Amino acid sequence: MSFLPIGASVGWLAVLTGVVGTYVQRRRVTTNGAAGVSLATWTLFAFMGCFWITYGVVAHSAQVVAGSVLCLPIQLSIVVRLRPGVRWGVVARAFALFLACCVVPTAMLGWSGGVYGTGVAMTINRLPQLIELVRNADAGGAIGLLHAVTSPLAGELLLPWLAEEDRDAALGYVWQAVAALHVAYDIDRQSPEPAPDVPSADSLVDRALASGDEHAIKLTEAALRSFERTGEPALLWAAADASARLAG
């Protein structure tokens, strides 16, 4: 009996996760209405779906093509329910972000530039929600949103160990998983904004270890690693909040 290689198996699992997550969101919109569902995010997903289909064809990746082809009609059906016809400004901004982060880098740097640009576009689009993680996990969903931060940054650690031809696809699968987590756990925020003082790295490490919680430790490591590149204080606030919230 033969089995799929581990890389291919993970790829098809990512396809399944992305399709199921997208369908769950469509069902939510159909059943409960569109309140709290972001037109900008789902418009960006649809534009990126077209990008991933094209990339998958060029890269001869059945997983990328299949996942994107299956998700795109569901994404478009969600966009239609969010009334883009009366909110063209939102659609235009999403398209501009797609052009700037995906199309232009592909034209200038090749497909690798566009693939990495999808991650940049989603980060820019969803950064306010990372800040919102600090403002509220009281209504639930903190662990899910926490993994939306730690998962892609864990994937970053694995990239050097993957074959060069698998790295772009792996990055795409990671961002599909992040999208699914946001679909499942993105909720309205209620907690107060964090204090303006940004905690130090040593303080965050001490808090994470004192909490005894593996999720707080993972987030702290990921936040500190990302903060070195971006200087975004929301990362440190999120790590401090997780250590306090998840302490045993």
Image: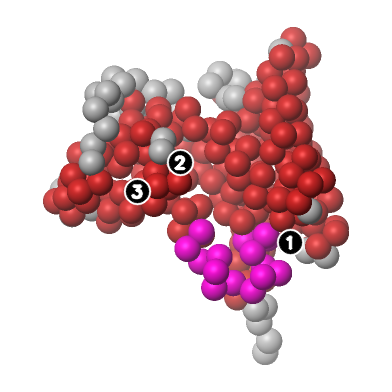
Relative image position of residue 81 (x, y in whole percent): 71, 22
Is residue 118 or residue 151 the one in the foreground? 118
What span is colored magenta in the figure? 156-170
Relative image position of residue 198 (x, y in whole percent): 27, 32
Q: Nearer the viewer, mark 1 or mark 2?
A: 2
Q: Are marks 3 and 1 in contact (CB under 8 Å)?
A: no
Amino acid marked by disc 3: Leu
Q: Which residue is mark 3?
A: 224
Is 168 one of the magenta-colored residues?
A: yes
The answer to whether residue 47 of the structure is visible from this angle is yes
Q: Secondary structure at mark 2?
A: helix
Q: Residue at x 60, y 41 (%)?
A: 120
Q: Measured along the vertical axis of the image, is residue 84 above or below residue 215? A: above
Q: Which residue is mark 1?
A: 63
Q: CA distance from mark 1 to mark 2?
A: 32 Å
Drawn side of residue 149 relative to residue 86, left or right: left
